[in-house]
Image: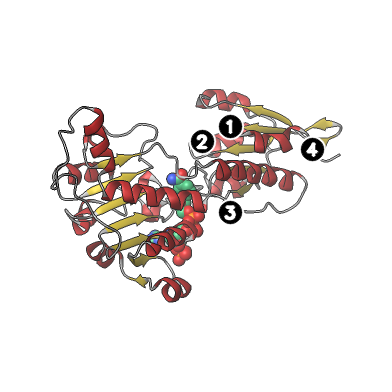
Amino acid sequence: MSGEVNGVRETVVVARHLLPAGMQPLRGRFEVVEGGLDATRPRLLELVPGAAALVADPAVPVDAELLDACGPGLRVVANFAVGYDNIDLDACRERGVVVANTPDVLTQATAELALALTLAAARRLSEAERDLRAGRWTGWDPAAYRGLELRGGTVGVVGLGRIGLRYAELVAALGAEVLYVARSAKPAAERELGARRLELAALLEAADVVSIHAPAGPETRHLIGERELGLIGSGGVLVNTSRGSLVDERALAAALAGGRLGAAGLDVYEDEPSVAEELLAAPNAVLLPHIGSASVASRDAMALLAADSVIAVLDGREPPSRVA
Ligand code: NAP
């Protein structure tokens, strides 16, 4: 029976937590061990020896130390995310470990969240709600909380991949003009949405809203820093649902505090789960706790896809989505 070696069930270690949609197919075939959401690094190092598969997530750095702690029987790391910046791909390749992720099934949920952050930041929803809850609302005021409308506005998408494209379709449907930056041209988006490809600096200058959807990595670290924030400008909105490392958070907090950037909508941070005090203090920032893919449908589908990847590789097949 697959899932067994010499009559002994193989072990799948879930570093933190996997939803029932993913647990169920694994439990029938393997010995499954879960670290729990509060699993510390030392606890994880204790848990993984002998693992044939490791299910990780963006909060779990998968490096040479962890791979070596798993031992030579490890064949697959299934990441419960589309981004895989938490994984040392070279270290996995060197050890013959397959790496899989969960693309597509979270595209709609994450694009919708980016749209929600766009609207919330552009229309100052957090600021207005905070005032109401604190009893600072003194009555209808024609001049209060005035923000940006998307219709007739210009939205710059940095990284027109799966999520960036879906987000572009959503803002285009609301009447925004779409600009984009990507490594390669996207003729279908240009044809169907009228999207225009620009260099990053030109996009930042032209856009009212800039939404980040490029992956994290050495190439994109602090892609948006002090200079870039200045180009977006005091009337502009920055949205980031990609990864915290793409934006220089100190520069962002300073730009918001100094009025050099209009507003920001963030789902991701440089040092999660801690969030810089200066950002927490910024009135014109909408801050969410990394919930881009957190719809019921998306998270269940991600869990199932991560389990499918484990089962495929341990059965000697290609996983549905392989990144290394
Ligand atoms: P994707 O389909 O691979 O799209 C990434 C896009 O970024 C591609 O269009 C790529 O261009 C572009 N790109 C790559 N390097 C770039 C650079 N240096 N400058 C500008 N653009 C660059 O990935 P996806 O599925 O849309 O996911 C995007 C990211 O969203 C993931 O990496 C992940 O970190 C993040 N994410 C976050 C959440 C959340 O919970 N907040 C949920 C899901 C995903 P080419 O097409 O030309 O190669």
- Mark 2 → mark 1, Cα distance in angstroms: 7 Å
Q: Do the residues labelled 4 and 2 touch (CB within 8 Å)?
A: no
* Number of numbered discs overlaid on the protein picture: 4
- Mark 3 → mark 2, Cα distance in angstroms: 17 Å
According to the picture, the residue beneath numbered tag 4 turns out to be 3
Would residue 259 appear left or right of 180 to someone viewing this image?
A: left
According to the picture, the residue beneath numbered tag 1 turns out to be 15
In this view, 32 is above or below 252: above
Residue 256 % position (x, y): 19, 44
Q: Are marks 2 and 1 in contact (CB under 8 Å)?
A: yes
Residue at point 23% right, 32% down? 132
- The answer to which of marks 4 and 2 sits earlier in the sequence is 4
According to the picture, the residue beneath numbered tag 3 turns out to be 323
Would residue 252 appear left or right of 318 to someone viewing this image?
A: left
| Residue 71 visible somewhere in the drawing | no
Q: Which amino acid does label 4 sit on?
A: Gly
- The answer to which of marks 1 and 4 sits earlier in the sequence is 4
According to the picture, the residue beneath numbered tag 2 turns out to be 60
Question: How packed is label 4: few (under 14 Cα within 10 Å), some, or many (20 or more)?
Answer: some
Q: Quadrant of ligand 1?
A: bottom left
- Mark 1 → mark 4, Cα distance in angstroms: 19 Å
